[in-house]
Image (cartoon, grey):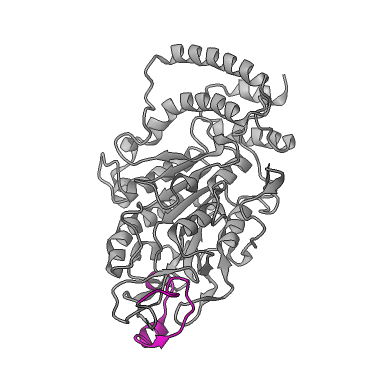
Amino acid sequence: MNRRQVLRSAVAGSLLMEGIVADLLAADQLAAGPLAVGSGAADPLAPRLPPAVAKAKQVIFLFMTGGVSHVDTFDPKPALARDHGREIKADHPEIKDRPGYERIYLKRPQWEFAPNGACGTEVSSLFPHVARHVDDIALIRSMYTSHSNHYNATLGMHTGSFAFSRPSIGSWVSYGLGTFNRNLPSFVVIAPQQTYAGTQVYAADFLPGVHQGTLVVPGAEPVANVAPRVPADRQRIELEALRAANEEHLAGRPGAAELATRLRSFETAFGMQMAVPEAFDFSAESAGTLAAYGLTPGQTAGFGWQCLAARRLVERGVRFVELIDTGSSNNWDAHGDMLSHVPLAKNVDQPIGALLADLKARGMLDETLVVWTTEFGRTPFNNTADAKGREHHPWAFSSWLAGGGAKGGIVHGATDEHGLRSVVKPVHTHDLHATILHLMGFDHERLTYRHAGRDYRLTDVHGTVVHDVLA
């Protein structure tokens, strides 16, 4: 017996040793090189160590759909309040040749900012719970992106591509690292409904299908049809017979990625029948934990439920969990009235604060990278100074990182005095992706996949690691 077989035999049925053995098996897996698509010898979801020492082992990606206003949340602009009503000129993509926007005027922030934590980072009154954790947060105030449409900017934030479908960042992490828990998907997306760009935001595209995100919809049955319909021993026999037939079929069609994916999907589904109900069963959580997330016993929906589910999933070895706060019919797209930010912030603020506190209390924050972002910001101007809303703004917005090797208590970069453009140490979406992969132990230029005659990567031909936000 080789080392791998001995390890597997020694721990059969032992959940306590699962994490230790996963790391040891991952060390063995490193020597295997790139995973062969359709190969029965290599498990594409086996845990793997990254090429470099990684600060983060898992990611929780918090995506705020619709475009959060930076100047009303994480980027204080006293000059914007001072110069409210001043006319300015801007060759902005959202107002160019747009009737009624021949003249534009600065519009003041609608919420007050205050310093927080030992570091003194200023956050607006919209996020009081998140503000308590600024000493653990690396706040990037100089984000910018390549498109002002929701569809394109959302696609870009998830895949690095602003025009064409490409693998999601969660799929890239799954491809590079596999999963610690073979009974759960390596990449999970929890969302009440689809966001802009739909399923493309968590699709594997040309990567092997096992790396596609699994959608979980909050509710009484988060994953549909997961309950077994026949006894486990009988189902195991049926699956073994099905596997034998499928492997014989696959043997005559080497490299057939879809066939290999289908074969593995049966095994994943079998494991999920046990693991999924337990992962989403909050009955063992204390009353204090539920209250911290803003939940009541038995509640199965809400962003608090999503955040607690994310903690439980990473606790059980899922590599990448994305939480989408809302859908395209009710989001941060505040054209009509900025006051819509109030209920949206209230919906996510307490749960995010509870998630950060919970991860830290359990000793998980050091190895779990929490990313908060949106697709773009909102204009610090409008066609009248008293306009209630703000327009799409790709030139500047804010994102932040916490845990997983991010440097807490710092602010990186800056926009100009009115929040119009990112001018000090600007960070593009590609740079954010490069930084996330770096914290996961990857050189973003070398995590590639051969497709259609060339090597593809998450950052395409762009991206620079933002070293200032690394601990």
- Kindly report the secondary structure that dominates the magenta region of the rendered protein: loop
* 402 is higher (above) or lower (below) than 230: below
Seen in the image, is 344 located left or right of residue 155?
Answer: left
Q: Image quarter for residue 72? A: bottom left
Looking at the picture, how far across and down is residue 337, in whole percent?
A: 28, 69
The answer to whether residue 471 of the structure is visible from this angle is: no
Magenta part of the protein: which range? 71-99
Looking at the picture, how far across and down is residue 359, in whole percent?
A: 45, 50
Q: Image quarter for residue 466? A: bottom right
* 104 is higher (above) or lower (below) than 379: below
Looking at the picture, how far across and down is residue 414, in whole percent?
A: 52, 75
Seen in the image, is 57 located left or right of residue 283?
Answer: right
* 428 is higher (above) or lower (below) than 164: below
- Front residue (pair 363, 443): 443
- Front residue (pair 452, 359): 452
Quarter that holds the C terminus: bottom right
Looking at the picture, how far across and down is residue 121, in whole percent?
A: 45, 72
At 47% across and 80% down in the image, what residue appears?
90
At 68% across and 25% down in the image, what residue appears?
254
| In the image, residue 97 lies in the stretch drawn in magenta | yes
